[in-house]
Image (cartoon, rainbow, N blue to C red):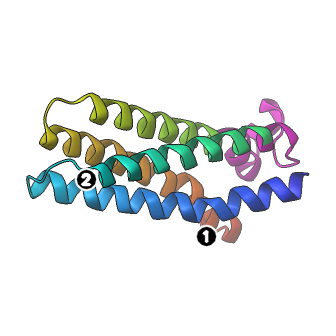
Amino acid sequence: MYNGLLHAHSGLRWLLFLFLIIAIIKAFAGWLGKKEYQKADNIIALILLSFTHLMGVIGIVLYFISPNVKSMKEAMSDAFFRFWSMEHGLLMLFAIVLITVGRVKSKKATTDIIKHKTGAIFYTIAFIMILWGGVIQPIILKHSWF
């Protein structure tokens, strides 16, 4: 079960990245180009939200069954275990919250420009957090460059 969920979590991240990048590009293009918030913008944001929450649920299950998650006392003395026990989960949780809040706030915004601007800001911050906590930091830990 663990391996299957881990592979699903790892594979679905590329779909999450794809929709997050599309949502960011469309949001910035709409904001800076003063474009109308269209049905396609809403659908992309909804798909992004769905993948984000699916990844969050799988991640929470993995957290409780992973051999890489240790008690806080054990985790704090080792960078690898500290990352998987605390840092990765917290960063991803904040990113999920940012994407969710960005979606809700942009949907409730009164003008098209504010809808695009809100999505652009929230999704970009979430993208940076996901990139750091899900890609860059694990690479650094794996190769022990620092």
Position of residue 77 relative to residue 105, above or below, is below
Q: Is residue 83 magenta?
A: yes
Give coordinates of residue 121: x percent, y percent: 27, 44
Element under disc 1: loop
Task: Where is residue 34? Give x, y as percent.
Answer: 8, 52
- Nearer to the camera, 125 or 53: 53
Which residue is painted at 68% across and 65% down in the image?
11
Percent across and percent down for residue 90 are 59, 37
Q: Amino acid at mark 1?
A: Trp
Which secondary structure class fits the magenta region best? Answer: helix
Compute the Cα span from label 1 to label 2. 36 Å
Q: Is residue 29 left or right of residue 61?
A: left
The residue pinned by badge 1 equals 145
Reading the image, the residue beneath label 2 is: 27
**The quadrant where residue 25 appears:** bottom left
Q: Quadrant of residue 71?
A: top right
Furthest residue in direction right, as rendered: 1
Classify 10 Å Cα crowding around label 1: few (below 14), some (14-19), many (20 and above): few
The reply, left or right, for residue 143 in relation to residue 64 is: left
Q: Quadrant of the C terminus?
A: bottom right
Q: Is residue 117 magenta?
A: no
Residue 74 in the figure: left or right of residue 39: right
Residue depicted at 11% across the width and 55% down the height: 32
Residue drawn at (67%, 71%), measured in percent from left and top? 143
Mark nearer the N terminus (1 vs 2): 2
The stretch in magenta equals 62-86
Give the residue type that dot 2 points to: Ala
Q: Which mark is residue 17?
A: none
